[in-house]
Image (cartoon, coloured by chain):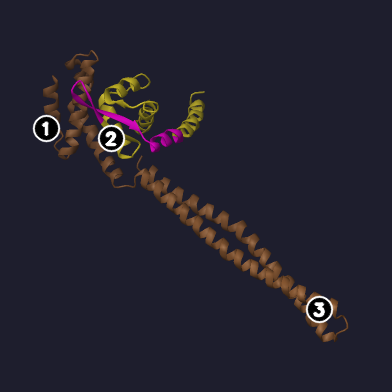
Chain colours: A brown, B yellow
Amino acid sequence: MNKTDFLRKLRIELDFLTKEEREDVIKYYDEMIQDAVEGGQTEEAFIETLGSIDTIVDTIRKDSGFVKKVRNKLSPEAKEAISVTAKVIGYILFVLGAIIVIGMGCSFAASGTMMAVLAITDIVTNPAQAAMVLLMRAGQIVLGAGLIIVAISFFILFFKYAKKGLEKLLDKLQEVLNKEDSKHV
Amino acid sequence: MESQLKRGFLEVVVLASLKYQDSYGYMIAQEVANVVDISESTLYPILRRLESQGFVTTYETTHNSRIRRNYQITKAGLKKLEDSDTDFREMKKIFDYILR
């Protein structure tokens, strides 16, 4: 069979494709045959090696579903964009959280320290006070120390778990995106 | 070879053939045929699959006053190649075991 016959028959058999898809196939084979002839092969012999038109059409028919599925799916670029966006949002949330935690922690620590320092100064400068007042000062010292401890645990908990949690969340997202990918391959 | 497995292999082999330079249908078929039994007709759906998944892009050039479609591997394609490297290492272990 020569090229003209081959392409004509192929075109007829591919009537289940859209015009654009059909021409894509025809262009592929047309180019392939011309390249083969240029490469020193005989047109008819080369066309023999391409297999029967039925087989070619069958393969393309089986595959057209796949390409359609993929077309409706997220492209790798879109996936990349989603994952980058998620990361950026995640880190922005992390930074905002850090600012709030640091702010709260610092004010807790500062007021705790102030309270304790004032109470200590008062006891040191006026040791001869009523027992009631001294007891109150002692209470203030304990309260101040408590506030400082709360602030420190705030920092520790946030930086220890928030970062881990964020990373886990992003991993999960990546996994979901990848799963989408392998479903059709 | 079982066809599903072979197709997965072929996709990667075709990507690998584009790793260092762009190429066109006939040349890819010739090159890939050196390592695996593949016909020009098998290659077409593979190239389409790779293109639809964004692993290769195409552009046209003129050759001897006719249009030739060239294929170029994308960033995603290179990543896919890298990923399959790990897959194949794992598979090699399995094959070594089966064929021991």
Kindly check if marks 1 and 2 are in contact, taking CB atoms under 8 A apart as contact. Answer: no
Secondary structure beneath dot 1 equals: helix
Classify 10 Å Cα crowding around label 3: few (below 14), some (14-19), many (20 and above).
Answer: some
What residue lies at 23% left-to-right and 18% top-to-bottom? Answer: A36
Secondary structure beneath dot 2 equals: helix
Classify 10 Å Cα crowding around label 1: few (below 14), some (14-19), many (20 and above).
Answer: few
Residue B15: x and y in percent read 37, 30
In this rendering, is residue A54 above or below A121? Answer: above
According to the picture, the residue beneath numbered tag 2 turns out to be B48
According to the picture, the residue beneath numbered tag 1 turns out to be A12
Q: Which stretch appears magenta? A: B60-83
In this rendering, is residue A65 above or below B63? Answer: below
What subunit carries mark 2? B
According to the picture, the residue beneath numbered tag 3 turns out to be A122
A125 is within the stretch colored magenta? no
Closest to the observer, B13 or B4: B13
Q: Is residue A184 left or right of residue B90?
A: left
